[in-house]
Amino acid sequence: IPRPFNQLPGDWRAGWLNLYRFWQEGGLHNLHHIMARKFQQFGPIYREKLGVYESVNIITPQDAATLFQAEGTLPERFSVPPWVAYRDYRNKPYGVLLKTGEAWRSDRLMLNKEVLSPQVVEGFVPLLSQVGDDFIRRARAQVGKSGREYWTADFTHELFRFALESVCHVLYGERLGLLQDFVDPEAQRFIDAVALMFHTTSPMLYLPPALLRHLNAKTWRDHVWAWDAIFSQADKCIHNVYRDLRLQRKSTTEYMGILCSLILQDKLPLDDIKASVTEMMAGGVDTTSMTLQWAMFELARAPAVQEQLRAEVLAAKREAAGDRGKMLKSIRLLKAAIKETLRLHPVAVTLQRYTTQEIILQDYRIPPKTLVQVGLYAMGRDPEVFPKPEQFIPQRWLGADPKHFKGLGFGFGPRQCLGRRIAELEMQIFLMQILENFKIETMRAVEVGTKFDLILIPDKPIYLTLRPL
Ligand code: HEM
Ligand code: 2DC
């Protein structure tokens, strides 16, 4: 007979004390390390309470499968309290990120058609390739300017701009020009605001929304400032597209972007469209850029893997006569390299679901309405799940052994990442273009760790060198 919930291991009785210890240990930036340690201490399942939030934490792919297979048609994850608090405070509508129940589902189904469906996604290829081409052009210009044969830099800000330019091109069908020498200060402000929004979320992560709003702490004020900047900039972009559409300034022959399609479909109220488009614009900056930075770092440290990928890309290019859409069908190893990057460097430290029925995990009964978290970071580095976890081996995703519930970087099921296809395409195309043009190098000696800043990011600047082939 399965064991009762109350017997779960873990020090879950002292919520506020736990949160306090967390602060003391600098746990804010070490959430992922603390989780990994708890799995070592308690085994593959433990119960925890932080502030007012209780959760059950799991690490094995089998348990993740049990959780997701019982998630039903209206899955819910942990809704980040400061994000909810901001919207309630400013009376802003929720997009799919924070909606629940049927309201979430109907928006999400409409959005899926315009953002995730294979037919539509195919149309993103030329838009994203253009942005990538500009990045390559810019990189070559930087090499020229440097007076050397290469370009060495911390690429964080370059990649933020690349990512925002990319997501805006598919959302709005328009270029912002962020890869030129002159960068629009408003766009730069948006980028800074998204980073600040993430950064100010983590210290408030486990405090209840009602408390936050009444707290006049600097973190909360900065958080509000950041979201205000995000919403007002997104609003301007959305308004411009809307105006061009009304004045029939948009050419209807070519693809006009996700926002236009949603408006023309006329199946979602404009406010709901705006809310989700704003989320996508903000969600499209730090996520793909950080993953690309990690991917280039890993490729720089594994030159043999880099050469294999380059050979694959160049062969694909010859075969497809340069057609990017066709090339995407024959770059298995590059796709595996992106999975491998997200294994070691996931954006999300955990995936979470509220159970809707009783499930059994590690032979414990988990009641309905329990918050269960899959420790994605810990799973990716668990030698039981991935042999030699510290090594970057894209090939491990192509072998014969089962990958069941192991590649969960974008989440799972109907509530998985809405931007998944955009993100994947953007990263595949970018890496193809880089590999065709440059050798990626780094100083081998520098060890870079991971820091939790709501999303997981490098704990120190990564310096990379691009050397024209
Ligand atoms: C949700 C990861 C890029 C928009 C999520 C979730 C994860 C994730 C793990 C939660 C999924 C779940 O609970 O099952 C990533 C990674 C990215 C990325 C690893 C890039 C490397 C993007 C981009 C966008 C985006 C580019 C916007 C275009 C969203 C939205 C949600 C979400 C709106 C909430 C969806 C919903 O609740 O229905 N993402 N993401 N993400 N992501 Fe992403
Ligand atoms: C953070 O304990 C740690 O994709 C918490 O593009 C649990 C948690 C809940 C939801 C996760 C969040 C963590 C990390 C950031 C995620 C978010 C869901 C979506 C969001 C993973 C793991 C992200 C980055 C979205 C953000 C869109 C936003 C800017 C509008």
Image: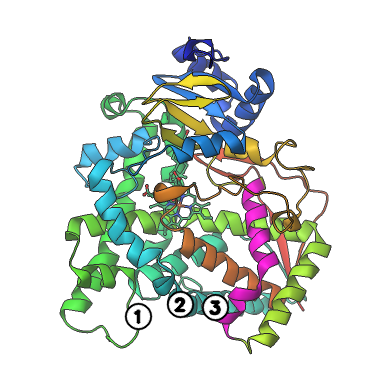
Image point (34%, 73%), residue name: 257
What residue is disc 2 on?
127
Whole-percent x, y for residue 85 in the image: 29, 35
Element type where label 1 sits in the image: loop
Disc 3 to disc 2, C-alpha distance: 11 Å
User: Could you say which disc has been placed on residue 48 in the image?
Assistant: none
Is residue 294 visible in the rendered image? The answer is yes
Nearest the eye: 449 or 423 = 423
* Depth check, front residue: 143 or 307: 307
- State the extent of the magenta-drawn residues as a range: 323-343
Q: Residues within 10 Å of mark 1 (few under 14, many from 20)?
A: some
Q: Name the residue located 59 percent from the left edge and 36 percent from the top edge.
A: 62
Indicate how the structure is coloured in the image. Answer: rainbow
The answer to whether marks 2 and 1 mark residues whose Cβ atoms lie closer than 8 Å is yes
Residue 169 is at least partly visible in this image: no
Image: 68 above or below 163: above
Q: Position of residue 79 (x, y in %)?
A: 36, 36
Q: Residue at x 53, y 14 (%)?
A: 3
Front residue of this view, candidates 272 and 244: 272
Q: Quadrant of the N terminus?
A: top right
Give the total number of marks visible in the rendering. 3
Where does the image place residue 31, in percent across and percent down from the top left? 57, 30
Q: Amino acid at mark 3?
A: Asp
SS for dot 2: helix
- Spatial separation of the CA atoms under disc 1 and disc 3: 20 Å
Type of the residue with mark 1: Tyr
Residue picked out by circle 3: 134
Q: Earlier in the sequence, mark 3 or mark 2?
A: 2
Left or right for 452, reference 77:
right
Ranked by sequence position, the earlier of labels 1 and 3 is: 3
